[in-house]
Amino acid sequence: MPFSRLSPHSRVAKIHPPPVTIGKKMAEYDHDDRTQGWVLELDSLRSFGGPPSPPLSSDGRRWSGEILPAGSVSRQVLAHQQQTDAIITTTTRRQPSQPLPGAAECLDFIKTRKGRFKPAKQTKLRNSLLGAIGFLEAANAGDFAANIWNETPVPTYALIMMAIGGTMALGMIYFCIKDGRLSYQNLRALKEERGYLKEQRKLHQDDSNMVRTIDCFLDMNTRESGTELIDRIGSDALLGFSALIVGIGTFMAMDGDHDSANYKASNLLTGYIGNTLPAIFGVCNLLWSSYVWVRAKEQQRAALNYVKGSTRISQMLRNRTSSIQVHAALNGLTGIVAGSAALATATQWWAYVILLPCIITSGTVNIFWRKRVGYERPFVLGQISSIDQDTVFEALRYANECHRRVLRVEATGESDAFTILVPDTTSLLCALDVIRKNNLFEDYCLRVLEDKELSGRLFGHAVFDTQSSADGPTIDWHNLAALDDQVLMIRLLKIAKDLLNGRSGVWKIEEDDDDNGTNS
């Protein structure tokens, strides 16, 4: 999750105190750029009603070419080793003193029944939408044969098609339940975050900057909660139950020759009863998608006015909001057309012709969300600091420069992501610092725990053993970075290298999005 989405509703300190309505969708632009996307969201949220853009730096850009934020461990190491290196060129802007909220640095893990480890508590919003959910419309069309050949006796080929359609419809229930559980986990964690933010807002009522920052995150939280509740849980519940009814009705239709009661019941289930729920979801989804589209439009207008003068940032903001609008438009229109067509399928065969492009578009929208619009971000559940404009631009510059530097070097084949991002490739401290800043610490810990030999040796150290409980291990970033066991350090460095290099493909995808997203 290196430079993937930070979160589409993060707002920054320079926003009007009341929650802004143009939030998080910005971050959704790059599903695989969690850091850059989140910062874009922060910037666009803060810009809604914010002050005009600050002057450009002396070189005519919003930020210089340096890659590392001031005050970071990596920056300190580099400054000590190569003070003249271009990577640590000093910018003319005041360096930010407050870091953006990041992932937890001390994580507890528990062992699952399958013997794998997972975090004891969810610390980040996950982009966990299942690809199979994009084919829910296809599942609800599983009654095709039952409605078209609504006659007795039922032809053999129609019976075969009914069996396939009914099985497909009932099979989708598994994915609906699984996706609903994943979405509920996000929603539950978002509720906890919202409670914490409201408490903090009461405690900082006299600090206008802090109130604005908290309002940004509350606004982001609201948008994320709505997405989980309507786009995911609503879809899983209504379309999933519809698939269940349609599947049962289709199988009952197969026995219509021998039982008139089954024949009549199947007509009801595969008719208006089974297809009413998709229509209800289509209306709700259209309303929500319209809200998201308008929100993104306002967000784009305010953000582009706010960063006026910075071509690169303007392009990134425009790409982000354009992607959000494209997704919202396709999602809303597909849902309402598919819902209407589903109702018509009860009596009209031609409705399935209309339903076919909706099925294709639904799958495309699902992929678009998972690969370009969706995002992951750490929850704000610990200390929170007010975020100013410099903080946002610094983090955005850092994420942007990191992935561009990786792409340039890998294009020539001269190096890899680990070598480019870590200033001292022999230092575990520097490697862990890059991992921490890019919200990869949880991924890193899971890789460490998967290596039984390494984790066994690691937790043989008193500092880790005493922290852990009977329920599972605890890994603290600071203790890990302070290790002086050379053998362990080499093993841990290798895992860090594999993790960062494994993400290089993600940055390639994201770069393509940045270059082409303007016309999205």
Image: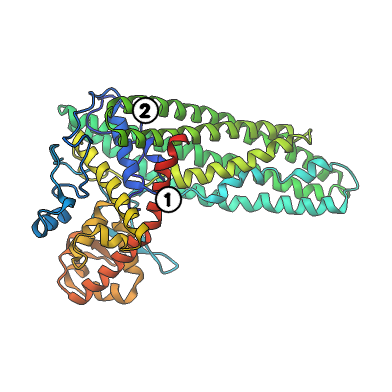
Estimate the x, y position of residue 465 in percent, counting from the top left.
21, 70
Looking at the image, which residue is at 47% across and 32% down? 325
In the picture shown, does residue 230 fall above or below 35?
above
Estimate the x, y position of residue 244 in percent, counting from the top left.
66, 46
Report the side of 212 relative to 124 (left or right): left
Looking at the image, which residue is at 33% across and 36% down? 41
In the rendered structure, which amino acid carries the disc numbered 1?
Answer: Ile
* Residue sitting at the far right: 153
Q: Count residues near mark 1 (Cα–Cα under 10 Å), then give few for <14, some for 14-19, many for 20+.
A: some
25 or 509, which is in the foreground?
509
- Which structural element holds mark 2? helix
Residue 299 is tagged as 2
In the rendered structure, which amino acid carries the disc numbered 2?
Answer: Gln
Disc 2 from disc 1: Cα separation: 25 Å
**Residue 24 is drawn in which quadrant?**
top left
Estimate the x, y position of residue 280 in percent, counting from the top left.
60, 31
- Which structural element holds mark 1? helix
97 or 460, which is in the foreground?
97
Residue 509 is tagged as 1
Looking at the image, which residue is at 33% across and 54% down? 408
